[in-house]
Amino acid sequence: MTLYANDQYFEAKLQLRPNNKEVLDFVYAQIENRNDCLIAKEEKLKTGIDLYLTSQKFTQILGRRLKKKFGGIMILSRSLYGVNRMTSKKVYRVTVLFRLEKKDI
């Protein structure tokens, strides 16, 4: 099964700070078990890693699971992406930041 999708389409961004192999392996395992969520793009930064995912709802669930398993801090934010032409509803993209605390590293 593939974990990657088209890099142009994503609904949410999962930011992992700092880059931790155990946390990243946990995230990959969770995504692999799902049929409705794929990784659109992966960005490695100096401070951590950003994963662009195709499911907004699962990204929020994943953030809560990370907080429960590893401790740390989870911050959820959203930004207006545009307006749906058919329904005139506002379309948002979600960003979930998961930061391990210094003592957890």
Image (spheres, rainbow, N blue to C red):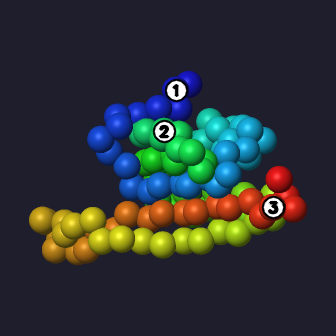
- Quadrant containing the N terminus is top right
> On the picture, is 105 further left or further right than 32?
right
User: Sequence order check: which comes first, mark 2 or mark 3?
Assistant: 2
Residue at x 36%, y 71% (from the top left corner): 79
Tag 3 secondary structure? helix
* Residue type (three-letter) at the residue carrying disc 2: Glu
Q: Amino acid at mark 1?
A: Thr
Residue 38 placement, left or right of 29: left
State the residue position of label 1: 2
Which residue is denoted by mark 3 in the rendering?
Answer: 102
Residue 82 x, y percent position in the rendering: 22, 67
Q: Which residue is mark 2?
A: 42
Which of the marked residues, 1 or 3, is nearer the chain's N terminus? 1
> What is the quadrant of residue 15 in the picture?
bottom right
In the image, what residue type sits under mark 3?
A: Lys
Q: Gap in Å between the C-alphas at discs 1 and 2?
A: 14 Å
Provide the secondary structure element on which disc 1 rests: loop
Identify the image quadrant of residue 14.
bottom right
